[in-house]
Image (cartoon, rainbow, N blue to C red):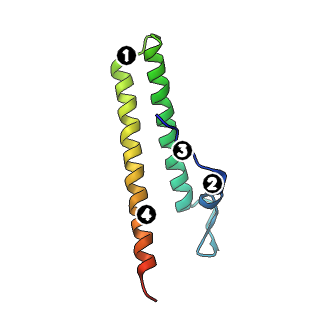
Amino acid sequence: MKEVTLNNDTNIALGSSYEGGQKTPDNAESFGMMLKNAMQEVNKLQQEADQSIQQLAGGQGVDVHQTMIAVEKAEISFQLMMQVRNKIIAAYEEIMRMQI
């Protein structure tokens, strides 16, 4: 499975603490940070699934059931992330089509 990573430009764009020109409160999580955290969680699940597959292939005493659960968990979380991304892009395109 491929690793889901963010490049430095995306980290900067998603990690900004400004929304609409106003600074958000310290305890409030920005939308960009929420997306960044979700992507990191998906990446962690992908890595855990890869590690479980490697342990199973290496005969290190990992159950097939646990490996399949880890793989499916990673797959479902990746599919959810892609659907959220698609909805965000669709919303952005709809906003761009609006006339002022």
Sequence-wise, the earlier of marks 3 and 2 is 2
Task: Tell me which amino acid carries mark 1.
Answer: Asp
Instruction: Provide residue 32's location: percent of width, then percent of height.
Output: 55, 60
Task: Tell me which amino acid carries mark 4.
Answer: Ile
Question: Pointer 3: what residue?
Answer: 40
Tell me if label 1 and label 2 are in contact, CB under 8 Å: no
- Per the model, the C-alpha gap separating discs 1 and 2 is 36 Å
- Per the model, the C-alpha gap separating discs 2 and 4 is 17 Å
Question: Pointer 1: what residue?
Answer: 63
Question: Pointer 2: what residue?
Answer: 11
Task: Tell me which amino acid carries mark 3.
Answer: Gln
Q: Is residue 31 visible?
A: yes
Sequence-wise, the earlier of marks 1 and 4 is 1
Q: Is residue 29 visible?
A: no
Tell me if label 3 and label 2 are in contact, CB under 8 Å: no
Q: Is residue 87 left or right of residue 19?
A: left
- Per the model, the C-alpha gap separating discs 1 and 4 is 38 Å
- Per the model, the C-alpha gap separating discs 1 and 3 is 26 Å
Residue at the extreme bottom of the image, as rendered = 100
- Secondary element under disc 1, as helix, strand or loop, is loop
